[in-house]
Image (tube, rainbow, N blue to C red):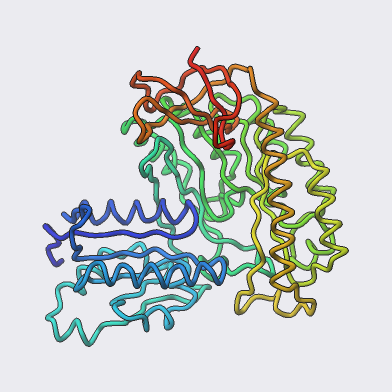
Amino acid sequence: MYDLKGKKAAYFTLGCKLNFSETSSIGLQLKEAGVQTVAKGEVADICVVNTCSVTEVADAKCRQAISKMVRRHPGALVVVTGCYAQLKPEQVSALEGVDLVLGSEQKGQILHYIAERLSMMPKERALAAHEHHTSKTADIRSFMPSCSCGERTRYFLKVQDGCDYYCTYCTIPFARGRSRNGSIQSMVEQAQEVVRQGGKEIVITGVNIGDFGKSTGESFLDLIKALDKVDGIERYRISSIEPNLLTDEVLQFCAQSRAFMPHFHIPLQSGSDEVLRLMHRRYDTQFFYNKVTRVRELMPDAFIGVDVIVGTRGETDDLFREAFNFMVKIDVSQYHVFSYSERPGTKALQIPYVVSARQKHERSQQALALSQAKLHAFYERFVGQERPVLLEHSKTKGIMHGFTDNYIKVVVRTTEKLDNRIVNVRLGEWDETEELLTAKLI
């Protein structure tokens, strides 16, 4: 293989936590091959852009990021991967300065492709520019393990990839392929490595993590039970999990477990049964209401974050009002609000009723205002209480930030070196930004 020692690489990631985790693994592969991460102001030999394609806006941001990398690192080998690369390889490979486009199946072999390309003579490399290597969705089979820390104290452990659900608005199954996963043993080994690196908190990530086990005959419940036994990891958080896969057994285990935090992120997408039907979601509003109620029964202090999409095809004014009224009713902590974006190849395009851009914006603003009200109410429930916080370093001297067990963000004024330490604090009033609570060490 071509010797990459001494080469320098720049990385840019767009989209979800899973993408950031995968970029971290790509960076580790290159580091083990002798590639250094470029320092600020230096020009890289290799640029890796890991893309997202969840909306049209995401596609545009990807194109801007690629263009910026090309300008900032003239002469570098520019490699583009991720969901945008898988869904629109011809469009991406045609962008100025792009040398190589790798799909979801090829992402794990990025080191091979980079070494092969850099081993070429300049004329050969010029002729090979704008190549793309992608597989059909049905042929995406490999599982690329990844566990990243980034700049903070939390690690992100990828346990699953792909999705078999094919909701009408979503391109993720086309971009990432069928549901698949690594083994529980491999996940435990990665968690043990996090302990060796000094990590205390792991966020379990994936595309449809509750579907864990399709490849290995295991289950998500088996996974979290095994991870809970890893000595040294003091906190686990479950990232987005489908309501129909957040089983009562999983909830009961989390409620009495050693390390799983009272924190859930559950996609609702719409509070209208008719819109849920048009989306091909696998539950109705009554099911979702019961799920939230059950979380509250078992873990009254739990933070419950919920995804919603406004302005989807078929969402009439009456159906939005119905959806919004349901959102008001359920006892959740925060809404993550997305405006519907038309995606080529999705079945949603066959739904006749189209919501205008103005209506989407108005509905989004209503939902965001509701979210802010619910978040404030949730935080204020805990003012004056004691909670454990995992502290993170801050760029401002004498200031530290962190999250409580139930995901309340706090600011602590201290000169003590408490980075990556779990400490007990008393929660105080809002800080001046009204985005987090002040807290004092106990």
Q: Residue at x 75, y 32 (%)?
A: 296
Q: Residue at x 49, y 34 (%)?
A: 227
Between residues 155 and 357, which one lies in front from this camera angle? 357
Left or right of residue 302, residue 218 in this image: left
Between residues 186 and 306, which one lies in front from this camera angle? 306
Between residues 153 and 425, which one lies in front from this camera angle? 425
Instruction: From the top left corner, tell me how far across and down residue 420 is, in percent.
Output: 39, 27
Q: Which residue lies furthest to the front in this view?
A: 432
Q: Which residue is drawn at 48% across and 30% down?
A: 402
Q: Quadrant of residue 264?
A: top right
Instruction: From the top left corner, tell me how far across and down residue 117 is, in percent.
Output: 21, 74
Instruction: From the top left corner, tell me how far across and down residue 331 is, in percent.
Output: 77, 38
Between residues 141 and 350, which one lies in front from this camera angle? 350
Left or right of residue 318, residue 67 in this image: left
Left or right of residue 359, residue 162 in this image: left
Left or right of residue 45, residue 390 in this image: right
Q: From what the image shows, is residue 198 above or below residue 36?
A: above
Q: In which quarter of the image is residue 127?
A: bottom left
Q: From what the image shows, is residue 187 above or below residue 391?
A: below
Instruction: From the top left corner, tell me how far across and down residue 405 is, in percent.
Output: 56, 28
| Viewport quadrant of the N terminus | bottom left
Q: In which quarter of the image is residue 434?
A: top right
Question: In this figure, what is the number of numbered marks?
Answer: 0
Q: Residue at x 58, y 61 (%)?
A: 163
